[in-house]
Image (spheres, grey):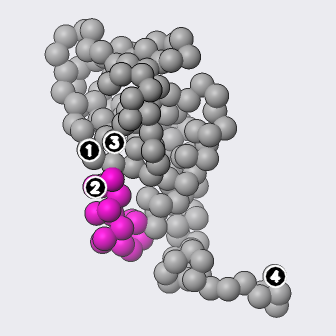
C-alpha cells in the first residue's frame, strides 16, 4: 500500500484500526466498516497514500476489482446494472474532488451516490428491460 503504485484491489476493514496517510497531507483513522480503493472495481486506480496498522493487529478483506466486476457482469441483471451506474457516479464524483484519496467519501456521500444509482437503475430497468442504450430516442418521445 504505497503511494502512486498500481492498485488492483478493494480493501474492506473488518476489525482493527489503521492510519491512512494521504498524499495531499491529511491523515485519517481507518475503522471497521471502511473501504479503501473502491474505484479499483471500475477504473485504473493508484494508491493515494499509505495505510498502516498503527493501533495493533486488524483484519482486512481484499477483493480483486477486475475479478469482481467480471463476475458481476457475468451474472448480469439488475445488480450488474446498479453496480455499473454506481461506478459511473463514483468515478465522476472522484474526478471532481481534488482531495480524493483511497477512502473515497464519507458514509453520507456514499449513501447519496448509492441512492442515485438505485433510482437510475430502476428507471432504466423499467424503460428498456436491458441496456441503458438499447432503445433509440426519437423526437416524438421528447
Q: Residues within 10 Å of mark 4 (few under 14, many from 20)?
A: few
Q: Residue at x 49, y 81 (%)?
A: 130
x, y (%) of residue 76? 36, 72
How far apart, in angstroms, are the residues tagged by discs 2 and 1?
8 Å
x, y (%) of residue 131? 52, 77
Question: Of the residues tagged 4 and 2, which is closer to the observer?
Answer: 2
How far apart, in angstroms, are the residues tagged by discs 4 and 2?
39 Å
In this rendering, does residue 42 appear at all?
yes
Precedes in sequence: disc 4 or disc 3:
3
Q: Residues within 10 Å of mark 1 (few under 14, many from 20)?
A: some
How far apart, in angstroms, are the residues tagged by discs 3 and 1?
9 Å
x, y (%) of residue 101? 50, 28
Element carrying mark 3 = loop
How far apart, in angstroms, are the residues tagged by discs 2 and 3?
10 Å
Magenta span: predominant SS is helix
The disc label shown at residue 142, or none? 4
- Counting the numbered discs, the total is 4
Question: Of the residues tagged 1 and 4, which is closer to the observer?
Answer: 1
Q: Residue at x 63, y 33 (%)?
A: 97
Identify the image quadrant of the C terminus.
Answer: bottom right
How far apart, in angstroms, are the residues tagged by discs 1 and 4?
43 Å
Above or below for 117 versus 5? below
Span of residues in magenta: 66-80
Q: For mark 3, what is the residue?
A: 8
Q: For mark 1, what is the residue?
A: 63
Q: Residue lying furthest front in this view?
A: 5
The disc label shown at residue 116, or none? none
x, y (%) of residue 22? 48, 18
Amino acid at each position: 500500500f504505497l503511494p502512486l503504485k498500481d492498485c488492483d484491489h478493494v480493501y474492506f476493514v473488518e476489525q482493527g484500526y489503521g492510519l491512512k496517510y494521504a498524499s495531499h497531507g491529511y491523515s485519517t483513522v481507518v475503522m471497521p466498516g471502511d473501504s479503501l480503493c473502491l474505484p479499483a472495481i471500475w477504473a485504473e486506480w493508484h494508491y493515494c497514500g499509505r495505510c498502516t496498522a498503527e493501533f495493533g493487529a486488524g483484519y482486512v478483506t481484499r477483493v480483486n476489482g477486475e475479478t469482481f466486476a467480471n463476475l458481476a457482469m457475468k451474472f448480469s441483471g439488475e445488480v450488474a446494472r446498479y453496480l455499473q451506474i454506481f461506478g459511473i457516479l463514483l468515478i465522476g464524483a472522484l474526478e471532481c474532488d481534488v482531495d480524493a484519496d483511497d477512502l473515497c467519501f464519507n458514509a453520507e456521500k456514499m449513501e447519496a451516490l448509492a441512492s442515485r444509482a438505485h433510482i437510475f437503475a430502476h428507471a432504466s430497468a423499467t424503460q428498456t428491460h436491458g441496456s441503458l442504450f438499447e432503445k433509440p430516442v426519437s423526437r416524438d418521445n421528447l
